[in-house]
Image (cartoon, rainbow, N blue to C red):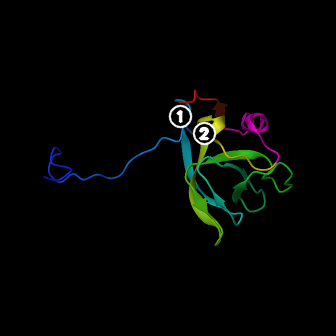
Amino acid sequence: MNAYSNHAGGFTDQGGYTPDNLVAGEFPAVQRIETITGGAAYPRGAVLGRITASGLYVLSDASATDGSQKPAAILAEPIDTTSGDAEAVVYHSGEFNSNALTYGAGHDATSVWNSFRNVGPCTIFLRKNQEV
């Protein structure tokens, strides 16, 4: 008897899912593929800023002067740019748990919330989810 004997024929275990509590509500999420830079590995939930001159995204640092100091998106999947720029899915709109985000230097939930309120046609809302 195998572990899947009570499953319909042809189905196998595709692995588990562990929720990360990033998405915090039902506001429509808008996702796009963008190019990420910065020479670092970023986790899902990293707060990204957009470099004005190149259009590339990087972890938003409040002291930057290239446009990326203003949070503009949230990384939807982990990405490693240590070997060069890479494409990844980012959220341009949605409702997210501020406790599940990764902030760059000089940022916190308040500074990021204030920036997201003025992003433009896309809207990102932050709130704190109830911890489980």
Is residue 34 found inside the magenta-colored segment of the image?
A: no
- Return the x and y of residue 79 as percentages of the image width and height: 59, 60
Q: Quadrant of residue 124?
A: top right
Q: Quadrant of residue 29?
A: top right
Spot occupied by residue 32 in the image (x, y as percentages of width and height):
56, 51
Q: Quadrant of residue 39?
A: bottom right
User: Mark number for residue 28?
Assistant: 1
Res. 123 in view: no
Q: Residue 61 versus residue 50: which sits nearer the camera?
A: 61
Residue 103 showing in the rendered view: yes
Residue 93 disc label = 2
Q: Are marks 1 and 2 in contact (CB under 8 Å)?
A: yes
Q: Which residue sits at x=83%, y=57%?
A: 66
Which badge, 1 or 2, is on the more N-terminal residue? 1
Q: Is residue 117 shown in magenta?
A: yes
Q: Position of residue 13 (x, y in %)?
A: 28, 51
Q: How many marks?
A: 2
| Mark 2 element type | strand
Amino acid marked by disc 2: Ser
Tell me where the magenta segment starts and ends, as one range. 106-121
Mark 1: which amino acid? Pro
Q: Residue furthest front?
A: 1
Cα distance between the residues tagged 1 and 2: 7 Å
Sort mark 2 into few (<14), some (14-19) or many (20+) by Cα contacts within 10 Å.
many
Q: Is residue 47 above or below residue 122?
A: below
Q: Secondary structure at mark 1?
A: loop
The dot on residue 84 is none
Q: Residue at x 62, y 40 (%)?
A: 100
Q: Position of residue 43 (x, y in %)?
A: 61, 53
Q: Residue at x 74, y 62 (%)?
A: 54
Decide: is 111 above or below 51.
above
